[in-house]
Amino acid sequence: MKAPVPFGQFYPGDSPVHRLEPRAKMGLVAAFMAMLFTVDGFAGLAAATAVAAVAVAVSSVPPRLVLRGIRAVSIILVFTLLAHGLRWNPATVTLLRVGPVALDAQGVVTGLFFVVRIVLLVVGTSLLTLTTSPVRLADGLERLMRPLEVLRFPAGEVAMMLTVALRFIPTTAEEAEKIVVAQVARGARFDTGGLLKRARAYVPVLVPLFVSLFRRADELATAMEARCYRGGAGRTRFTESRMTRADRAALLVGAAVMILVGVVL
Amino acid sequence: MNRRRTRLLLEIALTIALAAVLGMITLWRMPQGGSISLGMLPLFVLAFRRGLGPGLVAGGLYGLVDLLVDPYPPVHWIQPVLDYPVAYLLVGLSGVVAAALTPALQARMSRRVALLLAAGITLGASGRYLAHFISGMVFFGEFAPAGQPVWLYSALYNLYVPISAAACFAVAIVVVPAIAGVLPVSGEESS
C-alpha cells in the first residue's frame, strides 16, 4: 500500500484558461452544463463540442488528461447506449437482430445523443479541475459564499476549514505512509484476507493517525490564537483573488453565447 | 472567537483531510466510481466525539473537498450535489448517538458501546445510501429509457455504501474506545 502524496487532478500551467478567475471559470462551466441540458439535437452538441475543443486547445492541457475522465464513466456510456439501442423481440424492422434481441436504429441514435452529452459533461468539468488548483477552487467558493454572511452564514470559518483541510491532505498522507511502512516493517500485512480482515489490519495505523489528528488540532489552535486569529470576521488573505475586467467579460460573453446556443439549437 | 471553537473548527478541518487520505486508500474499487474504503471512518469518529452539529458540518465540507479534489464526472446537474455534499452531510447523522456514547465509553461498557456504534454507523450510512440512491434514480431515470426498473439499478449499484459501513464498523469498534482511552471524549485534553 502506498498513500498517494500528490492529490487531485490539477495540471499546472499558465494558459489563459488557468489564469481565468475561479469564479468566472465556475460560471462558464455552469453555463456549459446548462447548454448541454438545453440542446435538443446533434447540431447543439456539435456547437458544444466546438466550445469544449477550443477551451481544451487554449488550456494547453494534454487532451489525453482531459479524456481520462471518460474511462471512469465508460460503463455508464455502454449502459446508456445499450439501454436505448437494444430491443427485446420488437415488432417493427430493426437494424440488426440476433434471436429475440434486436438493435434499433432510432434507439442507437438517441443513445448516441446521451453518450455525447455525458462525454462533453466530463470534458467540461474535468477542464475546471485540471486548470484550477483545489485551493483556488476553495477560494472561489468562499467568494461565492460571502453574500450569505448577511444570513449569518460563517463563510470565513468555512473557508478556513476548507483551506486547512486541503493544506493538510498531503501532510496526513505522508504521515499515513510513514506509519504504514513502520507497521509493515514490524510484519503487518494490508493486502491479504477478506474485506473485513483488510480493514482490521489498518487499526494499528488508524489509532496513531487519529491521536495525531486531535493533538495537531490542539497545537494549531494554540498557534492560530497566538497569531490573533479571531474567526472569519475581518480576516484578510495573503493572496486575494480578484475578478479583472477580462474575467468579467469572458464570463458574461461566454455564458450568454452558450446559453443562447443551448436555447436555439 | 474562543479557543474551544477554533479547536473544534480545526478538528473538523483535519478530520476532512484524514477522510480524504483514507478515501484514497481503496480496499476495493467499483467499476463506475465509488469504492470500498475507510473514508467515512474519520467522519464517524468526529461525529461520535463531538455530536450531531460538528458531524454534519464535517460531512458536508468533506463532500465539498472530495468534489474539489477528485470529482467523479457528473452526468446530471443535480448529481454532484447529491453525491458529494448531501451524501456526506448525512453521514454526520451518526452524531446523534454521541451523548449516549460518551458515558458508555467512560464506563467501559463494551456491549453498549458496540450497540451505539452500530446504531450511529447504520444511521449515517443509511443517510448516505439514500442520497446516492436518489442520485442514481435521477441518473438512470435521465439516461435509461422509460419503463426500466431504475430504482433497482440504483439500489444494487450503491451497495458499496453499506459494505464500506461494515468495514468502518469493524474498525471503529476497536479504534473509538482506543482513542477515548488516550484522549478523553470531551476532546479538551491538554497535550
Image: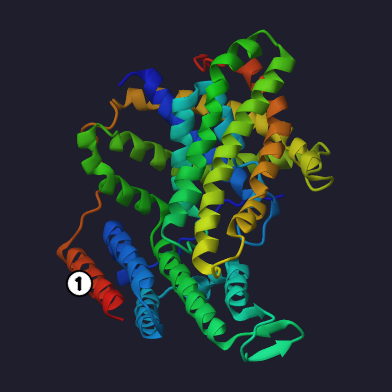
Image x and y of residue B3, in percent: 37, 19
- The reply to whether residue B68 is in sight is no
Residue flagged by tag 1: what amino acid is it?
Answer: Val
| Residue B88 versus residue A31 in the image, above or below | above
Q: Residue furthest left?
A: A245
Q: Position of residue A169 (x, y in %)?
A: 51, 44
Quadrant for residue B76, please give it.
bottom left
- The answer to which image quadrant residue A49 occupies is bottom left
Q: Is residue A210 left or right of residue A136?
A: right
Residue drawn at (18%, 61%) of the image: A244
Label total for image: 1
Of residues A265 and B24, the one nearer the viewer is A265
Compared with residue B79, is residue A127 higher up or lower down, i.e. above or below? below
The residue depicted at 60 percent of the width and 80 percent of the height is A85
A194 left or right of B140 in image: right
Chain containing the residue with disc 1: A
Crowd tier of the residue under label 1, counting other residues whose Cα lies within 10 Å: few below 14, some 14–19, many 20 or above? few
- Quadrant (top left/top right/bottom left/bottom right) for the N terminus of chain B: top left
Q: Position of residue A100 (x, y in %)?
A: 74, 82
Residue farthest toward the front in the current orientation of the protein = A91
Q: Secondary structure at mark 1?
A: helix
Can residue A132 be seen here? The reply is yes
Q: Is residue A116 above or below residue B139?
A: below
What residue lies at 41% left-to-right and 84% top-to-bottom?
Answer: A42
Q: Nearer the viewer, residue B147 or A215?
A: B147
Report the front residue among B32 and A138: B32
Taking A211 as reference, is B82 above or below it? below
Which residue carries the number 1 mark? Answer: A253
